[in-house]
């Protein structure tokens, strides 16, 4: 009985303590709301030169609505009614303004602009507001919010913001955010410190790639006199020159890495576009001018899937890859069975026939989907970038494209090396007559090979839908480059296609910043012509009697 009474008494005491805590929390929240309300109601009557201290008091209230008030004022959407001085968020809609009470979030009746007056602000106040918002965000539990707040103060520092960083840096749990806070404080020391403090800050900022740091150092170096420097100024100039040179070397290095990355991403697209053409041309000797339209069909397949499943955008590409392979592969088999098999041994007629088919497919797409370009939405997991440092980042869409193209390449290589179909394809490509003598159905191999090449082109179209708009002329932009890759790498050689695609993509990306995209393409084309003069069969020539 005593034990039961003790348990009951403990429960009553705990419940009472919890109720008191909730009451205190409610009272504190009510007090904060009351303080914010009093401060916000002073905005309409406060003069511009006294607005900054008032905004600082508003920022210190730490209310859930504080950030919204400051952001609305910074963006110029904070007004008050002339009749009763109620502060509202006002957004223009045609001839009227839709207004919402900034404190209660209550929607009010729309009014004309003559009934409103904007809360006074200017560029200096907007800078202060950015700092206040950054100061609020510095204590946010979300790392990304804190990091963005520090970057905001790095670009637009303020005394209150720097003081907040100084007080919070020791308690910051994330290493990246803490490092960014340290850079912000060192940059302020670089601008306002004594000579010894400036020299110490320069030494510590030597490995920093933040653009603000480099820009500040360049301005400081330019501000020093050209002649008659004091010993301190000479030491400062030497230190700044050394650190700026070191930073520029690192930026140049990461610039080269970035060009390589973009070159590989372009090469990956060329690889997917050319790999199907390689096996088609290598096995059948067919110059397929409709290969670009197979890519176009793959891209439109992705567009149709997103239309059919609007709620499954995140999975649309995963569904589009096999669907595009089947659609383009099926069309390729129809073309081979219906046209190309009757033109074997006549390359000129095959070229003209496939060119005519490409025009037919383009017009068919224009009739069904209209000539206008279509936008394919990127899934969330393909947007954004992987930030390595402030001057170098890898976009997720291009990174996934590189990985995906290599997966397709090695899968196709495995099929051709380890499967019976691959054995038949290699046999037909090296000696068609001997393959027939060994009971290999070359006509069946031709159809499957053409369908396989067209299907891979359809997969390339799925990739291209993430890089450009989908339109009837999508494939025409890549068909010439695909042929260049095939000729450069060696007809019918997959490894040659891989090396050629990555090489041409990288060379293009390194030349474009120097000479422009058009002249870069011309230089690549001229270089390729000169290379073919020396090695007519490409980097990796085909082996076997068919190569003779």
Image (tube, rainbow, N blue to C red):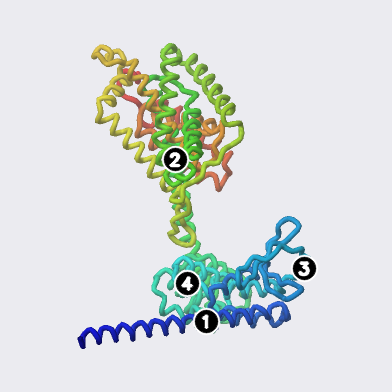
Circle 1 SS class: helix
Locate the C terminus by quadrant. Answer: top left
Task: Give the image location of residue 305, x and y in percent.
Answer: 47, 37
| Gap between marks 4 and 3 measured at Cα | 37 Å
| Gap between marks 3 and 2 measured at Cα | 60 Å
Q: Which of 208 and 8 is in front in this view?
A: 8
Q: In this view, does 214 lie above or below 402?
A: below
| Gap between marks 1 and 2 measured at Cα | 49 Å
| Gap between marks 1 and 3 measured at Cα | 41 Å
Q: Mark 2 points at which residue?
A: 267
Residue drawn at the location 38% of the way across and 44% of the way down: 403
Give me the disc on residue 115: 3
**Closer mark to the observer between disc 1 and disc 4:** 4
**Closer mark to the observer between disc 4 and disc 2:** 4
Q: How crowded is mark 2: few (under 14 residues within 10 Å), some or many (20 or more)?
A: many
The answer to whether residue 234 is seen in the rendering is no
| Gap between marks 1 and 4 measured at Cα | 17 Å
Mark 1–mark 4 CB contact (< 8 Å) = no
Residue 22, quarter of picture? bottom left
Q: Residues within 10 Å of mark 3 (few under 14, many from 20)?
A: few
Task: Give the image location of residue 74, x and y in percent.
Answer: 64, 69
Residue drawn at the location 53% of the way across and 75% of the way down: 136
**Closer mark to the observer between disc 1 and disc 3:** 3
Q: Name the residue under label 4.
A: 140
Q: Which of disc 2 and disc 1 is earlier in sequence?
A: 1
The answer to whether residue 301 is seen in the rendering is yes
Q: Which of disc 4 and disc 1 is earlier in sequence?
A: 4
Q: Which of disc 2 and disc 3 is earlier in sequence?
A: 3
Mark 1–mark 3 CB contact (< 8 Å) = no
Q: Nearer the viewer, residue 15 or 285?
A: 15
Q: Name the residue under label 1.
A: 163
**Closer mark to the observer between disc 1 and disc 2:** 1
């Amino acid at each position: 009985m005593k034990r039961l009474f003790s348990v009951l008494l403990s429960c009553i005491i705990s419940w009472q303590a919890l109720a008191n805590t909730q009451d205190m929390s409610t009272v504190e929240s009510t007090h904060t709301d009351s303080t914010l309300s009093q401060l916000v109601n002073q905005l309409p009557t406060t003069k511009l030169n006294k607005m900054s201290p008032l905004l600082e008091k508003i920022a210190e209230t730490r209310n859930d609505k504080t950030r919204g008030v400051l952001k609305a004022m910074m963006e110029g959407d904070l007004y008050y009614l002339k009749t009763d001085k109620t502060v509202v968020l006002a957004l223009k809609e045609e001839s009227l303004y839709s207004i919402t009470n900034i404190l209660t979030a209550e929607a009010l009746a729309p009014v004309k602009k003559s009934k409103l007056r904007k809360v006074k602000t200017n560029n200096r106040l907007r800078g202060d507001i950015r700092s206040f918002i950054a100061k609020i965000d510095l204590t946010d539990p979300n790392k990304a919010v804190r990091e963005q707040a520090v970057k905001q103060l790095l670009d637009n520092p303020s005394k209150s913001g720097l003081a907040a960083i100084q007080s919070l840096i020791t308690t910051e749990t994330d290493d990246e955010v803490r490092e960014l806070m340290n850079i912000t404080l060192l940059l302020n020391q670089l601008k306002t410190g004594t000579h010894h403090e400036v020299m110490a800050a320069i030494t510590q900022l030597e490995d920093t790639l933040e653009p603000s740091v480099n820009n500040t150092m360049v301005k400081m170096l330019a501000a020093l006199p050209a002649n008659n420097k004091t010993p301190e100024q000479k030491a400062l100039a030497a230190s700044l020159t050394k650190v700026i040179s070191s930073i520029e070397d690192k930026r140049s290095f990461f610039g080269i890495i970035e060009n390589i990355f973009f070159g590989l991403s372009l090469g990956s697209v060329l690889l997917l576009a050319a790999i199907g053409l390689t096996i088609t041309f290598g096995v059948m000797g067919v110059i397929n001018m409709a290969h670009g339209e197979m890519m176009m069909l793959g891209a439109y397949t992705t567009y149709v899937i997103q239309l059919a499943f609007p709620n499954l955008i995140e999975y649309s590409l995963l569904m589009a890859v096999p669907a595009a392979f089947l659609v383009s592969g099926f069309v390729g088999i129809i073309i081979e069975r219906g046209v190309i098999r009757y033109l074997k041994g006549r390359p000129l007629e095959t070229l003209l026939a496939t060119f005519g088919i490409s025009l037919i497919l383009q017009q068919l797409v224009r009739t069904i989907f209209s000539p206008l370009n279509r936008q394919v939405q990127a899934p969330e997991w393909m947007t954004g970038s992987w930030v390595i440092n402030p001057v170098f980042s890898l976009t997720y869409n291009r990174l996934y494209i590189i990985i995906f193209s290599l997966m397709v390449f090695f899968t196709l290589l495995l099929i051709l090396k380890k499967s019976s179909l691959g054995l038949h394809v290699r046999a037909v490509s090296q000696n068609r007559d001997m393959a027939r003598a060994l009971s290999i159905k070359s006509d069946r191999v031709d159809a499957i090979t053409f369908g396989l090449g067209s299907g891979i082109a359809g997969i390339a179209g799925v990739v291209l839908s993430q890089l450009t708009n989908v339109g009837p002329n999508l494939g025409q932009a890549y068909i010439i480059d695909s042929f260049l890759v095939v000729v450069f790498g060696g007809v019918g050689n997959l490894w040659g296609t891989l090396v050629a695609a990555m090489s041409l993509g990288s060379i293009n990306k390194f030349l474009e910043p120097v000479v422009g995209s058009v002249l870069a393409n011309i230089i690549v084309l001229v270089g390729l012509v000169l290379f073919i003069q020396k090695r007519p069969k490409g980097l990796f020539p085909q082996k076997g009697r068919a190569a003779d």
